[in-house]
């Protein structure tokens, strides 16, 4: 198991940026990020001290680039597992490629980046925040808001890191297929009509009924494969 080492700041630009100096097992956290990032240039909006912002560093020198490309989904599974320790009414589901949803709303996001032989797993979880900016209020939730009780950010962090260590070891030793069955059972998009966009204003999205996450980490959209890191997904209303 990984012996995680925690490095905490009250304020930082981005925990993923801090993690660039890290080595295997290092975890960088902050109460507030001045420039928290999501995929394709999106900002991560979070109230200071209310939520979990962390970036964990793991070694992937033994893995091929193809194998390493499934890491965001491995992290997503670990986050869902960790959050499900605290949820009583609904399970956390993985929304390909990098979000965690509870009862149709986003509770967490993942941003993974390669740096040499390391992969940085950036994780943001809405833990105690109960009010959100108007532009995301209808789509976001938190553990506290959903369960109507208080949670410790440090305890949530510990649960997720425990699950990440387990998932990482299984992934490295046995491959993505060893986690695939469990991941497919918590696939938020499967069987939904969706549109996959390369950018927010992509004029030619890939549309169709989602066949689910595939064993190579791609998403089946109407029989066409779309690979993680290349697309933004929105459900068709």
Image (spheres, helix red, strand yellow):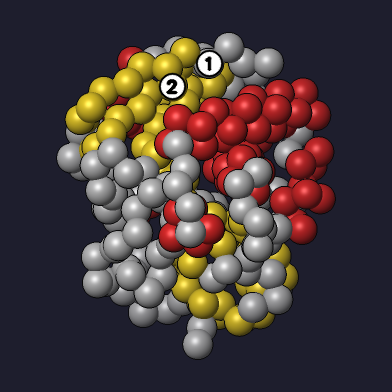
Q: In this view, does 57 lie to the left or right of 85?
A: left
- Residue ID at (58%, 22%): 60
Q: Residue 4, which numbered label?
A: 1
The foreground one among 228 and 7 is 7
Disc 2, SS: strand
The foreground one among 1 and 133 is 133
How crowded pointer 2 is (Cα within 10 Å; few <14, some 14-19, many 20+) is rated as many
Q: Earlier in the sequence, mark 1 or mark 2?
A: 1
- Residue ID at (42%, 78%): 204
Residue 106 visible, this angle: no
Q: In which quarter of the image is residue 79?
A: top right
Q: In this view, does 200 lie to the left or right of 141?
A: left
> Which residue is outermost to the front?
149
Tell me if residue 3 comes above or below residue 114 in the rendering.
above
Q: Residue 49, which numbered label?
A: none
How crowded pointer 1 is (Cα within 10 Å; few <14, some 14-19, many 20+) is rated as some
Q: In this view, does 1 lie to the left or right of 160?
A: right
- Residue 106 lies, in percent from the top left, at 47, 61
Q: In this view, does 61 lie to the left or right of 120?
A: right
- Residue 76 lies, in percent from the top left, at 58, 46
- Residue ID at (43%, 36%): 153
Quadrant for the N terminus in the image: top right
> Which residue is outermost to the bottom?
237
* Residue bearing the label numbered 2: 27
- Residue 198 lies, in percent from the top left, at 41, 65
- Separation (CA) of disc 1 from disc 2: 7 Å
Disc 1, SS: loop
Query: Is the residue under label 2 in contact with that under label 1 (CB below 8 Å)?
Result: yes
Tell me if residue 194 comes above or below residue 108 in the rendering.
below
């Amino acid at each position: 198991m990984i012996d995680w080492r925690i490095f905490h700041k009250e304020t930082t630009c981005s925990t993923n940026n801090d993690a660039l100096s890290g080595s295997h097992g290092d975890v960088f956290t902050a109460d507030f990020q001045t420039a928290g990032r999501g995929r394709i240039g999106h900002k991560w909006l979070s109230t200071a001290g209310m939520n979990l912002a962390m970036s964990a560093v793991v070694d992937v020198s033994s893995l091929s680039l193809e194998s390493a490309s499934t890491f965001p989904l491995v992290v997503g599974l670990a986050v869902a597992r960790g959050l499900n320790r605290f949820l009583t009414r609904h399970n956390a589901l993985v929304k390909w490629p990098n979000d965690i949803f509870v009862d149709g709303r986003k509770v967490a996001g993942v941003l993974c980046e390669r740096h040499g032989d390391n992969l940085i797993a950036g994780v943001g979880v809405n833990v105690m925040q109960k009010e959100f900016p108007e532009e995301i209020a209808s789509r976001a939730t938190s553990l506290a808001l959903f369960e109507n009780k208080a949670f410790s950010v440090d305890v949530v962090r510990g649960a997720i890191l425990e699950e990440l260590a387990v998932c990482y070891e299984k992934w490295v030793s046995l491959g993505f297929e060893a986690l695939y069955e469990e991941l497919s059972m918590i696939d938020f998009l499967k069987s939904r009509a969706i549109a996959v966009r390369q950018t927010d204003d992509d004029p030619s999205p890939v549309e169709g009924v989602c066949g689910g996450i595939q064993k190579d980490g791609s998403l089946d959209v109407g029989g066409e494969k779309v690979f993680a890191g290349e697309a933004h997904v929105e459900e068709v209303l």
